[in-house]
Image: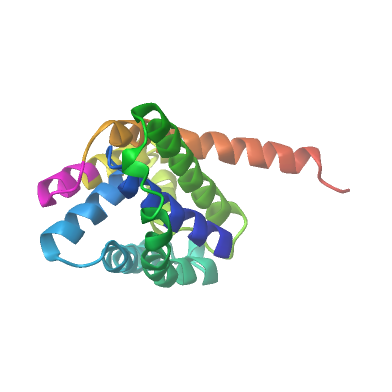
Amino acid sequence: MAVATLLSAIAVNLFIECNIGSDTLTVLLDGLHKSLGVSVGLASFCVSIVFLAAGLLLNHKSIGFSSIMYSFLIGPLINWIHPFIANMELSNLSLFIKIVIVILANFCFSITYVLLMNFGNGMYALDAILRYTESKLGLRYDIGRIGVDAVFLSAGFFFGGIVGIGTVIAFALTGPGTMLLEKMLLKLGRLYKVN
């Protein structure tokens, strides 16, 4: 749980500091940050608590200690890590290097979601909601994730979040990347399972 939260906080800051567009949730957080004048961490905390409440309402069996701790710690961790990433001056790097960093940040998010879904005591609250819609409505996780990302992107852009090539990369990779990593990890787990 701590590793997952740390990876997410790093990813948010990498996206924002590269300044070529963020993953769709960070576009929303950035937009809330700009329009409301609050820190990205506080915006993340508030959004996470809303997801947690919805996750508890729709799929409480998938919400556990890890889900709750993630929801309460992600915002403060984003704020704590921000000065370290900001001092790297990522916005001054070449576009190619920024794209590589954005892909790495997206990979961090996918690892976070897989860790919380499979190895923690409770999954990321948004994933609990998406898994609920998958089981009750038949909407595949990756398709649901792309739909949620479209809502985050639209709202974030409306509030002033930066949209760019980093956003396109994250939009395309988050759902499918998470599914691929989950399949690979579960396959690896079965391969090395002790009988």
- Is 17 on the left-hand or right-hand side of 182? left
Residue at left offset 28%, top offset 69%: 42
Q: Name the outermost residue toward the right.
A: 195
The total of numbered circles placed on residues is 0
Which residue sits at x=41%, y=54%? 85
Vertical placement of residue 108 versus 41, above or below: above
Q: Position of residue 127 (x, y in %)?
A: 43, 52
Q: Residue 9: x percent and y percent?
A: 43, 58
Say which residue appears at 46% left-offset and 71% top-offset.
Answer: 68
Looking at the magenta stretch, what is its main secondary structure?
A: helix
- Residue 26 seen by the camera: yes
Q: Quadrant of residue 129?
A: bottom left
Q: Residue at x 48, y 35 (%)?
A: 177
Relative to 123, 78 lies left or right: left
Quadrant where the image shows the N terminus: bottom right
Residue 187 percent across, percent down from the top left: 69, 36
Q: From the viewer's perspective, tell me whether residue 45 is left or right of residue 81.
A: left
Foreground residue among 170 and 117 = 170
- Which one is in front, 73 or 117? 73
- Residue 175 seen in this snapshot: no
Seen as rendered, the residue at the extreme top is 96
Is residue 157 magenta-colored? yes
Measured as percent of width and height from the top left, residue 98 is found at: 38, 35
Range covered by the magenta-colored residues: 153-162
Q: Which image quadrant for residue 36? A: bottom left
Please name whichever residue, 62 or 187, is drawn nearer the observer in this view of the structure.
187
- 72 or 190, which lies in front? 72
Quarter location, residue 140: top left
